[in-house]
Amino acid sequence: MPMKMLRCSFLDPQTKIQCNKTYSRPFSLKRHVTVKHAAYNITTTFIDCNPESQRPITYHTTSKQTTPVPTALQPTAADEPDVRPFKIRRQSGHNDVASSPQSQRSIESVEDADDLAGLPPCESPDSYTSGNKRKRSIDGFSGGDRLHLSRLAPPMPIYDVKMSTKIQGQPKGLEWRSQAAKHTFDMDHCRRRAEWGVNMAHRGTCILIPEDWKTLDPLEMLKLFDLDNCPSVQAARLRFYYSDHGTAFARALAWFAKWPRSGLEQDNFMGDGECKPMDASHTCHHDTCIVHVTYEPTHVNHDRKNCCGQARKLRQEGEEIPEHCEHHNPPCLLQ
């Protein structure tokens, strides 16, 4: 790709000879203008000489006056170009330069032109490409703004974590954030639902599987099932084990429902840190159900017991029971 160059088109008022010095960096061009043409307080022009662009764009900037200007060398009004400084304009004879892709590449080659002698930004900032240093990031905040917001953010929590008793030197339950763990659970969950004749989209009736039933075939259980063999409310909950950690199946279901999980969420799942603990709540109020499960803070889980108590009270009084509660999201199933 040809190197993009900048050319000084300063016209000497005495010799009428154009400078035509070329530089690859805006800073070098600025130094040249300051040193060679500092005695003339006139508007100096430099052009993007990118050979790839057939329609270059001309930029104008004013050189700093560092030495007294002799009266004899001061230019007349006729010698000064009639253009506004810092203005991007098209060359004569090309009416569609600013909108062409070639001109956009030419502008990009001088995106650091604002660094020349502390010059203000151009009057046409929209013509700059995404490479402009002054353009804000995609989230709408510059580096300074983001630093300011970081000072207002809460500090990073520091706490100890439980260590694994099976894998030396590794935090407990670390592999529960892996895709392999999610795949293993999803296969086990799908198999258990299929045994009871429902698919993964089932959200209707409850599927109650206590720990004592996890190895039994539902078809064989139906032959011996009666009301006396129905599991009690205090039946042990079904559990799921993976790697070095095991928990209730409903809690694992709530954990893998949202994926992926962050490290802070995992520490909270394992009971580490100072964040509010999270539980697997049953919206149906059946502890052994593997269908109606949600992941929410512990205090919300305990508050759902009030809805269950109100529904039982309405049933005892013979009044109509609403289908859902109005206090939680997702709502409690009261019927």
Image (tube, rainbow, N blue to C red):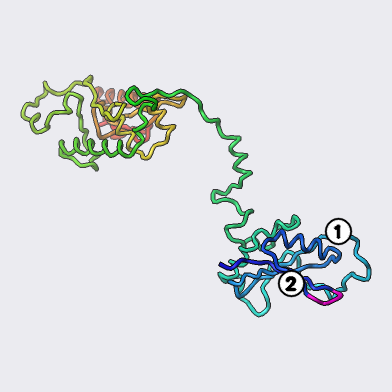
Q: Secondary structure at mark 1?
A: loop
The quarter of the picture where the C terminus appears is top left
Residue 45 in which image quadrant: bottom right
Tags 2 and 1 in contact by the CB under 8 Å rule? no
Looking at the rendering, the stretch of residues picked out in magenta corresponds to 13-17
In-front residue for pair 174/279: 174
Q: Position of residue 303 (x, y in %)?
A: 37, 25
Q: Position of residue 257 (x, y in %)?
A: 33, 38
Q: CA distance from mark 2 to mark 1?
A: 22 Å
The quarter of the picture where the N terminus appears is bottom right
Depicted 11 relative to depicted 313: above or below: below
Using a 10 Å C-alpha cutoff, classify the residue at mark 2 as few (fewer than 14 neighbours), some (14 to 19) or many (20 or more): some
Name the N-terminal-most of marks 2 and 1. Answer: 2
Using a 10 Å C-alpha cutoff, classify the residue at mark 1 as few (fewer than 14 neighbours), some (14 to 19) or many (20 or more): few
Left or right: where 220 falls relative to 301? left
Give amino acid for label 1: Thr
For the point 57% across and 49% down, the residue is: 140
Query: According to the image, label 1 marks what residue?
Result: 66
Q: Position of residue 35 (x, y in %)?
A: 81, 61
In-front residue for pair 38/127: 38
For the point 59% across and 35% down, the residue is: 152
Give amino acid for label 2: Asn
Left or right: where 39 falls relative to 334? right
Depicted 133 relative to depicted 175: above or below: below
Left or right: where 240 falls relative to 55? left
Left or right: where 335 falls relative to 5? left
Foreground tag (2 vs 1): 2
Q: Is residue 14 located in the magenta-colored stretch of the structure?
A: yes
Query: According to the image, label 2 marks what residue?
Result: 20
**Majority secondary structure in the magenta region:** loop
Q: Position of residue 217 (x, y in %)?
A: 11, 31
Depicted 225 relative to depicted 66: above or below: above
